[in-house]
Amino acid sequence: MKKLLSFILISALLLAGFSVQVYAISPNEITAPSGILMEAETGKVLYEKNSHEIRACASITKVMTMILVMEALDSGKLHMEDMLSASAHAASMGGSDIWLKEGEIMSVHDLIKATMVASANDAAVVLAEDICGSEDAFVSKMNEKAKTLGMKDTTFKNCNGLDEDGHLTSAYDVALMSRELIRHKEVFEFTSIWLDYLRGGKTQIVNTNKLLRTYKGITGLKTGTTSQAGSCITATAQRDGLSLIGVVLGSATGKDRFTDVSALLDYGFANYGKYTPAFSETLPIIKVKNGMQTELKVNANISGNFVIKKGNEKNITHKVNIPTEINAPIDKGDKIGTVVFYEDKKVLKEYPIVAEHLVEEITFGSVLSVLFKYFVQI
């Protein structure tokens, strides 16, 4: 009841034009045992609760499956219009599925739609088998990809998330792979679908992510539920250019996971925003020792955005770290120093200061070459 009254009060204030900031999430507000809130562009963690706790994640597994599917599409190995046949193994999947029969043919486009909207285990296996020849080979590729993404808490045993011993991950790792998947913008075509049809309108599918109907700015991403995993979700949302990933694992009920992840996203949007770094300093020319030139020009490409707490812009500072003198030789593009931006005393981002041009070292041969060119000109 208290949560409902708070929600009504905050909503009323927002509608009235007031700026509302919630600077903390109370320890008991996120009821799930594990969760995380991450900013998608930078990977900055904004909130975490037991984020590296090893847990099952059910059909959230399909986020990694879909990363490999999107990569296969990008490489041309797979095409949306390709027609794939369901194997006996794919047709044997239990749990959430679209009841594929052995030998049934369906397009890649519809199989992706079934996987992401209806969380179809059988459809996921059909895609996996086509890409790698077998589900086992595909799972090996999933684990390889997990390593490249820095997912140290994760081991996949299947491609759809059905309970299996050793099939485990963490909220942090789920956020990492969710961040990777949404780099493929075409996935939002599927994660934003609420209701659709397969088999020429004969099979209706409804998205398992109920936030599509209730949460402002929601763009995806995937739910999951099994007896071992409990109720889980990785939710992506965007407002005012800020893209967030909220992950909740092990909720007691489906309703609880939506409440918890909504609270995470609300916290992020209320408290954080994008900041574009301002840098107008003219970098000094550096003296060069033992060089064919005595001076070096440098530059720094200050670009991109930071994610900072709203209202904290005045506390953003920067420091230029650069030597007054440097030894030759120097190649164009060599790192000479850094520009470091801070929020209060915490490092936000470090940009390299690089050489604009080549400076050769003085040698007998280089001096002789210069003298030769001089006399030829005379």
Image (cartoon, grey):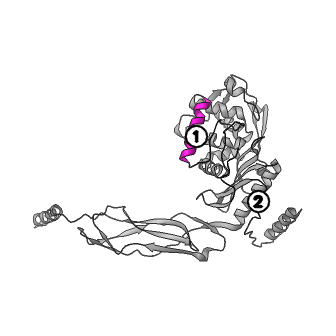
Residue at image location 72% in from the left, 59% down from the top? 265
What residue span does the magenta drawing correspond to? 134-155
Residue at image location 52% in from the left, 38% down from the top? 75
Tell me: 146 left or right of 188: left
Q: Is residue 160 visible?
A: yes
Q: Counting residues from the N terminus, which is met first, the one under dot 2 or under dot 1?
A: 1
**Residue 229's image quarter?**
top right
**Residue 115's image quarter?**
top right
Q: Amino acid at mark 1?
A: Asn
* Mark number displayed over residue 143: 1
Mark 1, secondary structure of its residue? helix
Number of dots carrying numbers: 2
Q: Crowdedness of circle 2 by 10 Å Cα count: few (<14), some, many (20+)? A: some
Q: Is residue 79 visible?
A: no
Label 2–label 1 contact, CB within 8 A: no
Up/down of 276 relative to 49, above or below: below
Image location of residue 62, percent across then percent down = 67, 41
Examine the structure image and report whether residue 154 is included in the region drawn in magenta: yes
Tell me: 237 left or right of 371: right
Q: Nearer the viewer, residue 24 or 269?
A: 24
Q: What type of secondary structure mainly makes up the magenta span?
A: helix
Looking at the figure, which quarter contains the N terminus?
bottom right
Residue at image location 77% in from the left, 58% down from the top? 30
Examine the structure image and report whether residue 244 is included in the region drawn in magenta: no
Tell me: 40 left or right of 217: left
Q: Nearer the viewer, residue 299 or 224?
A: 224
Looking at the figure, which quarter contains the C terminus?
bottom left
Up/down of 198 relative to 60, above or below: above
Up/down of 188 relative to 288, above or below: above
Identify the residue position indicated by label 2 in the image: 263
**Residue 58's image quarter?**
top right
